[in-house]
Structures are given as C-alpha cells and as structure tokens.
Image (cartoon, coloured by chain):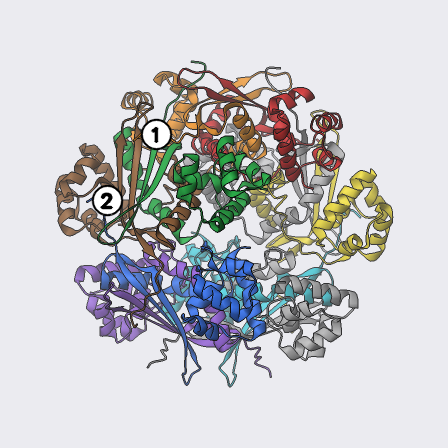
Chain colours: A purple, B blue, C brown, D green, E orange, F red, H yellow, I cyan
Amino acid sequence: MGKREAGEQIDEIRRKAGISWEDLAGRIGRPPVWTASAVLGSHPVPAAEAEILREALSLDPELVDALTRQPTRTADPAAAGDPTIYRFQELIQVYGPALKALIHEEFGDGIMSAINCSIDLRRAEHPGGDRVVLTIDGKFLPYDWVSAQG
Amino acid sequence: MGKREAGEQIDEIRRKAGISWEDLAGRIGRPPVWTASAVLGSHPVPAAEAEILREALSLDPELVDALTRQPTRTADPAAAGDPTIYRFQELIQVYGPALKALIHEEFGDGIMSAINCSIDLRRAEHPGGDRVVLTIDGKFLPYDWVSAQG
Amino acid sequence: MGKREAGEQIDEIRRKAGISWEDLAGRIGRPPVWTASAVLGSHPVPAAEAEILREALSLDPELVDALTRQPTRTADPAAAGDPTIYRFQELIQVYGPALKALIHEEFGDGIMSAINCSIDLRRAEHPGGDRVVLTIDGKFLPYDWVSAQG
Amino acid sequence: MGKREAGEQIDEIRRKAGISWEDLAGRIGRPPVWTASAVLGSHPVPAAEAEILREALSLDPELVDALTRQPTRTADPAAAGDPTIYRFQELIQVYGPALKALIHEEFGDGIMSAINCSIDLRRAEHPGGDRVVLTIDGKFLPYDWVSAQG
Amino acid sequence: MGKREAGEQIDEIRRKAGISWEDLAGRIGRPPVWTASAVLGSHPVPAAEAEILREALSLDPELVDALTRQPTRTADPAAAGDPTIYRFQELIQVYGPALKALIHEEFGDGIMSAINCSIDLRRAEHPGGDRVVLTIDGKFLPYDWVSAQG
Amino acid sequence: MGKREAGEQIDEIRRKAGISWEDLAGRIGRPPVWTASAVLGSHPVPAAEAEILREALSLDPELVDALTRQPTRTADPAAAGDPTIYRFQELIQVYGPALKALIHEEFGDGIMSAINCSIDLRRAEHPGGDRVVLTIDGKFLPYDWVSAQG
Amino acid sequence: MGKREAGEQIDEIRRKAGISWEDLAGRIGRPPVWTASAVLGSHPVPAAEAEILREALSLDPELVDALTRQPTRTADPAAAGDPTIYRFQELIQVYGPALKALIHEEFGDGIMSAINCSIDLRRAEHPGGDRVVLTIDGKFLPYDWVSAQG
Amino acid sequence: MGKREAGEQIDEIRRKAGISWEDLAGRIGRPPVWTASAVLGSHPVPAAEAEILREALSLDPELVDALTRQPTRTADPAAAGDPTIYRFQELIQVYGPALKALIHEEFGDGIMSAINCSIDLRRAEHPGGDRVVLTIDGKFLPYDWVSAQG
Amino acid sequence: MGKREAGEQIDEIRRKAGISWEDLAGRIGRPPVWTASAVLGSHPVPAAEAEILREALSLDPELVDALTRQPTRTADPAAAGDPTIYRFQELIQVYGPALKALIHEEFGDGIMSAINCSIDLRRAEHPGGDRVVLTIDGKFLPYDWVSAQG
Amino acid sequence: MGKREAGEQIDEIRRKAGISWEDLAGRIGRPPVWTASAVLGSHPVPAAEAEILREALSLDPELVDALTRQPTRTADPAAAGDPTIYRFQELIQVYGPALKALIHEEFGDGIMSAINCSIDLRRAEHPGGDRVVLTIDGKFLPYDWVSAQG
C-alpha cells in the first residue's frame, strides 16, 4: 500500500476516533503541520512515533509499515486545484517575484530552503474576522560553488 | 506598456540608483513585500504613492502611468521555475494537504483568503545559518451560501 | 470510498427512486444548486441533512459517511469538456475580461468571492424558447493588506 | 492591428478620458457587459455604434476598423489565471456537475446556449458587505437531430 | 458501470451476434451515426429504443440502465489520436479558419450548432476509389443578446 | 512574411475592397472552401490563380509570393478555441468513435483521407432556422502493406 | 480485454515459449514488423492468421478474440518516452522539416501515406558496428480536391 | 539571427534562384537529406561547404555565419503538426513498440543511434502510385556500463 | 506484473530483510547504481544475477520473471516531482546550456551517450557537511553520417 | 536586455574572437562550467569578473550590465529538447529512482543540494572512444524541522 493511500485510511480512522490533529501531534511530541503531513504521506515517521500512532489509532501493521517508509513527495493530483490549497499557489503567483527580490536584497543570491524548514499554522483573532497565520521558516542557502576535492 | 515590463524597467532604475526595496517601502509608508510586488506589477499603486516613486526614481510618465493601472495578476512564465520561487511551490506540494487539514480542523470548511492577506518576510539569525521567515496572514473565509435577496 | 464516487452512486439511487433534485433539496431545506453539488461531492453535508438523505434514499452508512466528509474540490476530469459544462467555460473565455473590468469599475480592485457565494438556476419562459437563468451572487472582496498584529 | 491589442489601447484612452464603461454603454445604448466585451475584442461592433465610440474617444481609424472586424474569440492567456477571473472558473469547477444535473432535470438533455445569451453584472447592497450579482441568461438548446433534408 | 464501458461491452456483444450498426439503427428507427454514438455512450437512449436493443442483443439490465442514463460527453482519451479519428481533427486544423470565414460571410456572426445537428456518413462510388461522404447539418445560431426579462 | 500573416493582410484588403469569398472563388474557378483556406495560408496557390488574385486585390509582390509558397499546415493557436471552430471539434469529440465504427463497418480497416478530400459548405433553408450544411468528401484508404520492391 | 493488454500477455507467452518474432512472422507468412505490431495491438489479425497464432502459442479464446478485433491505434503512454522509441521521435524532430522539403521538391504538395505503407527493419553489418536499417515505404498522396459528385 | 530563421531566408533565396535541394546537395557533395536539414538549421555547415553555398546563393555574411554555428536541435513548433511531418509521428505511434521489440530481438538491449545515423529519401515507381522510400540507417548501441576509470 | 510494480515489491522485501542496496550490489558483482536501477525496473537483469537475487531475497518466480524482462524505460510519474529527484532536473535546467557549450568546445558536434554510460554515487566528507558526489561517465558520440551501404 | 539574450550575444562575440570557454574561465579564475553558465545567464557575475570579461571581449556597457544582474533561472525552451541536453534528462528518467534510493540509504531522508553544488566536465581517454566525465558534487541536506524561535 502506498503512503498516500495509507494516509487517507489513517485520516479516516482518526476522524472516526474523534482525535484531532492537534491532539495527535501532542502525543508524538511533534508540531501539528509536521504530524499531519507525515501521516498523510509526506514524511517517514520514525519507529517510536509510529508505535505511538499505532496504539492511539489501533492501526494495522500494513498502515504502520507505510508510515515508516521513505516517501516520494510528488504533487497530489487529487489536491492541486482544491480552493483551500489553490489560494497558496495564487499567493506565489502574485507575490513570488517580490519574495525573490527581497530575499536577494537581504541575503544575496540564493534560496530559502524547503528542506531545512519548519511551518507553523495558527489562528489569530481579529475584529474583522479571525485569521490564518502561516509562518514558513527556512534556512537561507547561498549559491555556493563548493567541491569535495578542494 | 504593460505593468510587468514597466516593473522590470523601474527595478533596473532602482538598482542603478542604489535604492533598496526596504528604503523605497519606507518612503511610501508601505510594507516591503507590498511595495516590491506593486512595483513589479501585481498591484495598482495609488496616485500619492506613485508620485513619491516618480520623484525618488525620476520616472517617466509612461512608467508612472503603468504603476497606477489595474493589473491582471497572472503567473509570470519567466519566473515560475526559478529555484528561489520554486521552493515555495515545492512547500505547497509537500505540505498543502496538511495545511488544508489543519485549516479545516481549526476553522471549519473554508479557505485562507489570498485577497484579504498580508505577507511579511524577514531575516532571523540562527546559529545553524540565518533564516528566511515568511509570515502569511490571511483572513479565514468560511464557505457561506449568502444571497443578496434573502 | 471517495466523495465523488459516492455521489455518483447516490445519484443513481436517486434516479431509480424517482426523486428529483428539486424534491431532495426541499426535504433538507437547502437550495437545489447547493444540494446537487453537495451530494455530488463538492460540499460536506451536515449530520442532520445527511440523516434526512439517508432516510429518503435508504443509503448505506458508507455513503452517508462520504457525504459528511470534508471534500477536496478539484476539477472533475470526467466532466470538464462536457458540452453542457463547457458552455460556461466558454462564457468566461469570451466575457471574463469584461466582467473583470466592470467589477473593478464598480467596486475597485478585488474579486467576487467564490466562497461567500450562492448560485441559483431557474427556468424562464420566453417566446423564442425557454431560458436557463443562472444567478451567481458573491461577496465583493477588496484587496486588503490586513495583518493580525497591527 | 488585432482586436485585442486595439481593445487595450481603447481601454487606456477611455481611462485617461475619465469615461466609465457604464457611461460608454449608455452612449451606444447597449448593456455594459456587452459594451466592455465588444470594445475589448469579443464582439464585432456595428458601424453606427463604432462611430459613436470614435467620437466619444477620438479614436484613430485603425482602432475603429479593429472594432468593427469579426473576432476570433479565443482565451486570453494574459487573463486566464487572474484572481478576479479565476474565481469564475473555480465556481464552474465546484458547481459545474450540479448545474449540469439541474439543467437536465428541468429541461432534459441539452445545453444553455453561450451564443443566444445575455449577461448582467450589478452591485447589491448587503449588511455583510456589498455583493456582485452576475446573471447569465441563455436559451436552452435541446439535443435535436434535425436535418435540412427531412 | 459508466456509459462508455457499457458501450464497449455492447459493441462486443453486437459484433459476436453478427448484427451490423446499420441493422441495429434500422431496428430502432434511428440514423446509423446517432445509433452508434448513442450505444457507445454519447447520447441517452430513450426507454423504448433501449428495450428494442435489449431484446436484439440480449443485454443485461445493467447495460440497459447505462444506455438510458444521461451522458457526460467528454473526449475519449483512448480514441483521440487514432488515425481514423485524427484525420477529422486534421481537417479542422487545416480548414477551420476557412469554414469560420465562410460561415460569417454567409450567415453573419455566429456558429453552426453542435447540439441542433445531424450527421450522415455514406459510401459514394468513384472511379478513383470509393469515398466516405460525411454530411454535418447544423442550425446556424447568431450571436444574440437576449434576456428573459425584456 | 509567413503565409498566415500574409493571409490576414489579404483578408483585410479583401474586406475593404468589398469582395466576398464567394466572388473571389468564382474568379479563380475554385470552390469557396478551397479558396478561403488557400488564401488564409493552408494551400499553395498556383501561379495562374495567384495572378488573378493579385489583380483583383492589387496585392504587393510579397503577398503574392507568400500565396504561392508551400505551406506548413499547423494548428493556428489564435483560432483553436474560437466558438465557431470549437463546435466542429466538439462534434468529433462526441461523434468520432461512432464515425470510426461506421467507416470500419462499411469499408473495413482504414481511414477517410484528409488529403484526397474536398469540402463544401452551403446554406440550407429550414422552417426551424436556416442551417449550415457541411459536406466532407474523402477517399477511403484501406490499411495496405505495400512495398515498392515486391 | 483490450488489444494492448492482450498483446502484452501474448508477448509474454511467446517469450516463455522461446518463439521469436521472426519465427512467428514466418508461420503466418507476414513481415516481422507487421506481425509484431499486429500482435501488440496495432492491427486486426485476420481469422486465418489468428488461428495459426492460437495453435503456435496455445492462446485462450479471449486472447484470440482480442487479436481479431479492430484496434484504436493511439499512442501508448507506457512507451512514448522509452529511449529505443524516443530516438525515432528525435529523428523526426531533427530531420522532419528536411524530409518535408524533399518530398515537396520530388513529388509536389502532399504526404507520404502512413496507411498505404510498409516497414522493414534489418541488421546490416558494418566495420564500425552493426547497424539497424529501417525502411519506410509509403505511397505518395498529393493534395487532391476530389468530390464524389463531380 | 537564429539558425532556423536564417534557414527560412536561405530557402526562400534558393526557391527564387530556381536551385533544387538535389542540385545544392550535389554542389557541396553531401546527401540531400543532410543538406536540407543543415541549411534549415539542424547541423553546423563546415566552412568549405558554407563558402560553396554562399557563392551559389549569393548569401549575406550574416546568413553564412548562421549556417556555420552550432545548432540547438529542438522541435520546430511551426512544423510539428504539419500533415507531411505528422504522418512520420503517426508511424512511430503505431509501429514504435514493434520496432522496439524487433531491435531487442535482433540486437539485444539497446537503441538505434540517432547521432551515428544517415537518412535517405527517394522516389520508387509503383503501378499503384509512386512511393516515398525512406531509409534510416543508424548504428546499434547496446546498453553498456563502461567507465573511464576501469 | 510490470517491472516497476515488481521493483517496488522487491524493494519492500529488501527493506524488511535488512539488506542494503550496497550489499545487494556486492552479491551480484555490479555497481550499486546499476543494481538499484535494474531492480527498480530500468534494466533487464541477466539470468545469473536474477538467480542470486532470488536466493538472497526469496523472491517468487513472478518477481524473478519481471526482473529478467526487457524494460520500457519511461518516466515514472510517481517520481518526477519528488524533491530528491527534482534537484537533478533543476541542475540540468540551470547548467544544461553550459554543459552543451563545453561538450561542443571540447569534443565537437555530438552528445554524451546515455546508453554507453556508467554512473557512480558516493559520499565525500567535507567540513561544511558531507557531500553527494555523482559521476556520470558517458562515451562521446559525434554526429556522424554513416551508411551501411557506403 | 535580458541575461539570456545578452548571453547569446556575448557567446557570439567570444566565438568570433576565437576565445575558448576554457580560456575565458582561466582569465576570471573560475571553473569552466561556472563561467559558461554565468555568461549564458544562469549566475550573476561579480563586478571584478565582469570587468575582466568586458576587457577580454570588448563588451558594451549594456552587456556588462546584464552579466552582473540577478538571474531568474528558468528552463530555456529553446534548449530543453536539444539532443545534447536531452540525454541528461533521459539519464534522470532512467536512473532518478535509483539515485534517490541510494541517497536515502547512504545519508537518510534528504536531498543533494542544487545550490551548494559544483559541477565539473572533463574529457577522459578510453580505447573504446573518449568519454565525457561529468561530476556533480552537492552538499547533502537532511530534512530538518528547524525553527528560528526554538
């Protein structure tokens, strides 16, 4: 069974068990965004955390096995155009060149790492309506022509 | 002249004048991400701010005119695959389904607005290497079946 | 079972039971467009309405379960080029820039929300042949640079 | 000069002349959606209306000529992903199958014409924020196997 | 079972029963092109004709049911590049602009309906080799800005 | 100058000269569909016919030269989605598999040639509205494993 | 069962039986390229040849049935980018315009038929390494405006 | 100037000078397919041959310069769907898997080189109509895990 | 069973058996990159090596059979956008034109073979963090117009 | 002027000046792959190196200016399918999953950086024909959930 298919089944078990992502994240001592993305198939879950998840959700070995496997992190065609996800893509479309310009101005030629990176999502109250506050925190990596030999 | 082409010319003028985005943003009293994206063609610049930019950068009327025009905010094909921008797309690919799950858990069925939204990008020092911290702050919009008549 | 697959099965049950969408919508007290799109997989159906649907159509628990789940609202590849649906896409192709121009003229820079939005479809008699009258009624959202912190 | 390029130039002239689409539509006695889409290149403008536009905006013969020409009504790549236009596409993505189901239920097998069709866009006040009300009104066309010979 | 899958199964039953499309069309009193496209999934077959087909081919209820259902008429990816079908697409590629020009010259701004339309395919003898003669006969629909309200 | 660009210029000259395609076709003794497609760039025009066109429309040598050149008959991206042309593509989408089935039934395994082929478009009066009658008449080509050597 | 799926199964049976394509082609008295493409799903196999194949490979009736059926000859997505096949596509990319130019110079406006066509593939010894010699032999078809009526 | 644009201009000069590709190939002592593809931009022309072409066609230095430059041999979008070229692509679509099977049977795992390769196109007379005979002759390259170090 | 599906199953067996790719490669006396790509479906495994793999991993005959079969080496859609693989594609995007320029400067017009080629991947220690060192070693193939006949 | 367009012009100047990439790289004290990719538009050239290039090639200020500008490193559509570049893409297609498996086995979950990375291309002599030896040397980056705050 693929990690994504396993993730959907675990999510359904979680929902029926009435256990929130927040709660699940607390049990394994990881942030909620990491927890949800790992369970849904984007990260390998270490054995210890997988054991906690197995107990909390009474998972079959096959599902636990899928959790611990190394993922291929490709785009999920069933999700790419979903309005909740699409808004993030639209933000990159509208603000991407500006973010690039400011990264280069502040740090020089390079990128924000999507590998050495953490993401936090929280609710912020606001008189005009509560807000989703998403913080992406990635290491700056300068273009660097390094060679192992010298 | 299109807003994007105008934006590239203004950016070049800015670079040669040695004026940073940070500085330019300060002069018009707007955040840097808004300023860079507006100048590069993603927002209409109000007349007052456009006048300040005209003076600061000695812009031709044609460029000022392009700044104030209403944009079509489509994807810039010259930017979509650039590594600095691509990393943001990869993050949505890898974490999009998790963000969607957590938004629905915390707020219910709906989206984070990409219209009522602000973005902040700053440098954070870190012993393992300085970090890009990007904060996206958008109003939650619940799916709501409202009609003007009822 | 996915929501879309469930929707097709419920639609088939509905058709064989001889219950119209109009009728089904009346039973749950929702507009027909909302009802059909929710059953076909585009909205989560609240528990109370799902219970009414279960009774009306003698649905299996698995189908009821799919109805209440949170959807991913992606394009249905099995529907995108269907002539009845394509005509709406063609209208956006032909009239989209004009609608954008008029929205900006009347409301300023922003969008019509596709989230805070209702849709009505009705028949209108006409000597030249009866007409489909589709009313889309969405909240105007101005581009607004709001931050939770300030 | 192509109709679309001409449309952009006329739009710019219109904007500088401070004449609204609403006003322009009134002068030629046509609805605003028709007027904006025709000027922007989606319809041939009849000679009489083109003459009124020429006078109102002091248009060059080349622009008038482009206005009256028969259009090819293809998608405008510069507009397809713009957020204001994209929301309409998203609505078709989310509600298309429901609209198809209701058209078939009410009218039988067929389509809403995108050719014999009118569109109206107006502002409706609402305590929760003013709304864009878009009415699409198209003739129902049943699938009909007609032959000129029989 | 989908209409297309049902169509393939019925086609196979038809082939083994040694009943030609021509013959099948005669039994239900419909033209061959309509009959073949309806059986292969492009049209809903009315109950009376479906009953005749059921008898002629000893069809299972599930297949009859699929025949009578409302289709979604999307492109068949298994057929689009087939040489026999591709030649028709090539003709539109080569002659489409000319057909458009002649329709506009003869009828004015509008389209040939693909809904109110019949198609006939017959063999014509010719000394240089027999010919396929395809006649497409569709109602002209002028662009017409009609509204139900007045 | 490319044949397509030349075709657009000649079409504009033709329109201003008030000469119909029908008329132009009569002058060079060719059918209207051939004439329009050849002038618009889909066929090489023989020298004699090109000379008649040059005289009728007072064409520059460069345009005459383009007319006589061998074309590359690729799809015109500016035309592919135009509603008047799209309807033909939709017909192939809806009826292509049926046409293929009937060609194979009547002629055996092979295709209708798009090279040895003529096309006629005419108006047919009809009480329900006049009709476009398009006749495509192509030689049947059976799959035939012929070799020059044997 | 589809012809392509059947072809893969027959190929596997053939491989295990240790019967080469060359040998199989000899048994049915057809060239190897025709034989391999027909068995793999690109041609209908006549009843007599299908019977020989059935005997030689002890095929199930379902496989024989698939062999004799009329194919849809679409691109095989599982094969299009395979390096052995891709090299042929690259040759068309690099030499296609030259082949077109030479066909037009030698034969006039027209095509080499892909329907009335045979293909031969053989090994040729060469001191620099043996060579694949592929001969494509197709009838020239001139563009010819023939009508059944005249 | 790009090699492809230069190639089109040289081809036009060649056509007006009444010099055939055959003739041109003879003058530089190269096969016609090589000559046409090189002039049209797919190969760098050595200085000696370029000088002969310059004289034969009275070429400007800029065109000669383009001839001798190293090409990027990408697909020509203006040519890919042309019927004369498309037929070759269709042949690969229909026969590609068979050619792959026969190459592997005769030579083992590997490819026919598209780099060490020659192509010949000639006319062959035939009672059923003259034929285009295309011979592609490429070195077989076996998959071979060679390393410079071992 | 396809080679890719078989490869995934063998990989899972390997992982559970605690046998590294390095180890597996040693047992069959092949380099690790060759071994992993062959097992995952990109190469036919010779009978002797397949027998060793069968023993080491207790493989079913069906899996062994898949290992030895000739592959079609197409892109794996489940892998193309994975970040670990994507970085290699990005390198070609960023450095491809430079590599092409240097190959042509050093070797003349031609390519580096992807068929006569070996690949090595090793870890290199580095004070700034250990490095992946990938060596691609392919034979240079000059464009060479060779014919079997001359 | 864009960096890519500038790169093509500088390359042409370089070629006519008879200065090799190797030589140019030596003058600015950078590796050849870096030098060629930077000049062709993939890296910003520091002022000191740009001055050396200006002198060596007598470049106009506009070209020097383009050299020093920050690039957008998107795919070059004019290069992506070129055979010399395509072979690298094919290698990733064929060996990508194996490289991913070996990186994960040796280093754990992560990627080889395409930013902290150097590339070397050299000729290696070999009795079977000289070889291109390409060494890609990138820092391993483990997936690491680091936050600036904790």
Q: Along the line of sight, which residue is nearer the eye, E45 or F73?
A: F73
Three-letter amino acid code of the residue under disc 2: Trp
Identify the residue at horizontal 13%, vertical 44% (top origin): C52
Q: Nearer the viewer, mark 2 or mark 1?
A: 1
Q: Residue at x 54, y 41 (%)?
A: D3
Question: Which numbered disc covers residue B25?
Answer: none
- Local secondary structure at mark 1: strand
- Tell me residue B41's x, y (percent): 48, 60
Residues F14 and B29: in front is B29
**Camera-side residue of F46 and E44:** F46
* Above or below, C85 relative to A20: above
Amino acid type, callout 1:
Lys
Query: Residue I102's spot in the image, x, y percent?
Result: 69, 67
What residue is shown at x 57% (from left), y 66% (from top)? Answer: I94
Pointer 2 and pointer 1 on the same chain: no
Give the left or right position of residue A60, taking residue F45 as reference.
left
- Residue I140 at x, y percent in the picture: 69, 63
Q: Chain of mark 2?
A: C
**Residue ID for mark 2:** C34
Q: Quadrant of residue C88?
A: top left
User: Does B5 sit left or right of F7 as displayed?
Assistant: left
Left/right of residue E80 with respect to residue B148 in the rendered view: right
Residue A96 in view (yes/no)? no
Q: Which residue is mark 1?
A: D139
* Above or below for C114 versus C148: above
Residue E96 drawn at (x, y percent): 55, 32
Can you say whether A139 is above or below I94 in the image?
below
Q: Total marks drawn?
A: 2
- Disc 2 on helix, strand or loop? helix
